Image (spheres, rainbow, N blue to C red):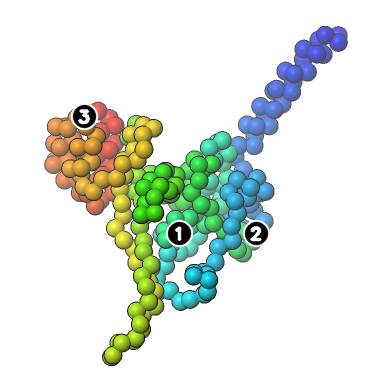
Amino acid sequence: MKLLNRFLAPIIFFVFSCSFSASAQEIPMTGSTGAITDFLLEAMDKTNTNWVLDGKREDIDGSPYLKDDFELGEIELIDNSVFTDILLRYNIYNDEIEYQDGGKNYSISAKHTLNKITIRDDIFVVEIYESSVGEKQGYFTLLANGEVKLLRKYNMELTDKVPARALQDPEPRKFIRKKDIYYVKEGLKRIHEFSNVKKLIEHLGDHQDELKTFTKKEKISSNNPEELAELINYYNSL
């Protein structure tokens, strides 16, 4: 009997552990006060956001957000833990996703512990890219998925103040939405920026004739994300 108990004990423990792990993978949130668990806070490095720039509060025209209002979404970590029904929005200028909890807003910086964050129709993933200040991790929206992925980087700048001049009032700083930047990712390779459809096709390498014919037939535009996604989906089907 003792031998049997020694044999069964680790098996029972293993089954119990697996059951607990499986049941803990999806963690529903209410998206309101007191909704975010300690586990999520620890994983996301909870940081209170505010409107302080250069050490002081100031008026700025425009908005840094993709959408000003918070919307229900979900966060999936690389360990497959999923947090649902969280109020989220994307700050383009800071390249951060914010969530709302207890009447306060908190930021989630792009980091490798994230698998994806979904806000309505937008799926945000984290990739390494070259910025004006060097290599960074940032948020990209996934437009086409497969062996080759199409990614979009939202882009925004904050202008300087314009001082008062003769017959002209001063102007505050402004958030200005810039042209989106598109990238392609092949397998596990680093992402590659492209400026137009011709450059994209050249980068893909094979199936050049088929891609050129498809682009001409479907009138694929370099500035249309849906059409670029069609091209990548077509390539993945070849």
Residue closest to the far front: 134
- Identity of the residue drawn at 77% across and 15% down: 8
Residue in the foreground of this view, choosing between 11 and 218:
11
Q: Which residue is mark 3?
A: 206
How far from the left and from the top, in percent, is residue 112?
50, 42
Residue closest to the far right: 2
Q: CA distance from mark 3 to mark 2?
A: 52 Å
The mark that comes first in sequence, 1 or 2, is 2
Q: Amino acid at mark 2?
A: Thr
How far from the left and from the top, in percent, is residue 58?
48, 76
Residue in the foreground of this view, choosing between 166 and 29:
166
Crowd band around label 1 with a 10 angstrom C-alpha radius: few (<14), some (14–19), many (20+): some
Q: Which residue is mark 2?
A: 33
Q: Which residue is mark 1?
A: 94
Quadrant location of the N terminus in the rendered image: top right
Q: CA distance from mark 1 to mark 2?
A: 24 Å
Up the image or down, 43 lies above or below 69; here it is above
Up the image or down, 165 lies above or below 173; here it is below
Viewed as shown, does residue 224 lie left or right of 216?
right
